[in-house]
Image (cartoon, rainbow, N blue to C red):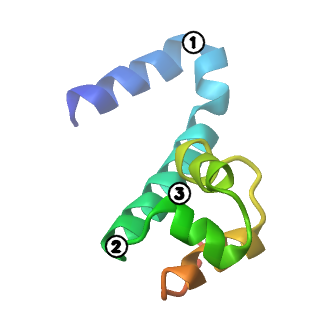
Amino acid sequence: MSDLKKYIEKRKATNPEFAEGFDEGYENFRIGVMLKQARLEAGLTQDEVASAIGTRKTAISRLENHIQDVKLSTVEKYVKALGKRIEIKIA
């Protein structure tokens, strides 16, 4: 187990407030990172994606940096603008 994972597990065990929102927050962060990475791999700017889906650059920035309660349809539009498709997996 990495030092980071050890630290997180320790914090979760000793701090209920930290533990309460950590997993959901982490998943939201991870989604944003995946969206940004896909955009960069497609060679597009935030402005270009925003224009393609009819929104502003600030909305794209919010998606990539602190995604919260985003509609699946918005993520689908974003991914479609990259020329990709979205896959959902339940684990």
Q: Which residue is mark 2?
A: 43
Q: Quadrant of the N terminus?
A: top left
**Closer to the observer: label 3 or label 2?**
2
Residue 44, located in which quarter of the rendered image?
Answer: bottom left
Mark 3 vs 1: CB contact within 8 A: no
* Cα separation between marks 3 and 1: 25 Å
Q: Nearer the viewer, residue 9 or 61?
A: 61
Amino acid type at circle 2 is Gly
Q: Which residue is mark 1?
A: 15
View extreme (top): residue: 14
Q: Earlier in the sequence, mark 1 or mark 2?
A: 1
Residue 72, located in which quarter of the rendered image?
Answer: bottom right
Image position, residue 21 (x, y; %) = 65, 31
Q: Is residue 22 visible?
A: yes
* Cα separation between marks 3 and 2: 19 Å
Q: Secondary structure at mark 3?
A: helix
Image position, residue 90 (x, y; %) = 60, 73
Q: Which residue is mark 3?
A: 31
* Cα separation between marks 1 and 2: 41 Å
Is residue 10 depicted above or below 49 in this figure? above
Amino acid type at circle 1 is Asn
**Closer to the observer: label 1 or label 2?**
2
Residue ID at (49%, 63%): 35
Q: Is residue 89 visible?
A: no
Q: Nearer the viewer, residue 15 or 65?
A: 65
Q: Secondary structure at mark 1?
A: loop
**Mark 3 neighbour density, 10 Å: few (under 14) some (14–19) many (20 or more):** some
Image position, residue 6 (x, y; %) = 30, 26
Image position of 64 (left or right of 52): left
Q: Nearer the viewer, residue 40 or 29?
A: 40
**Mark 1 neighbour density, 10 Å: few (under 14) some (14–19) many (20 or more):** few
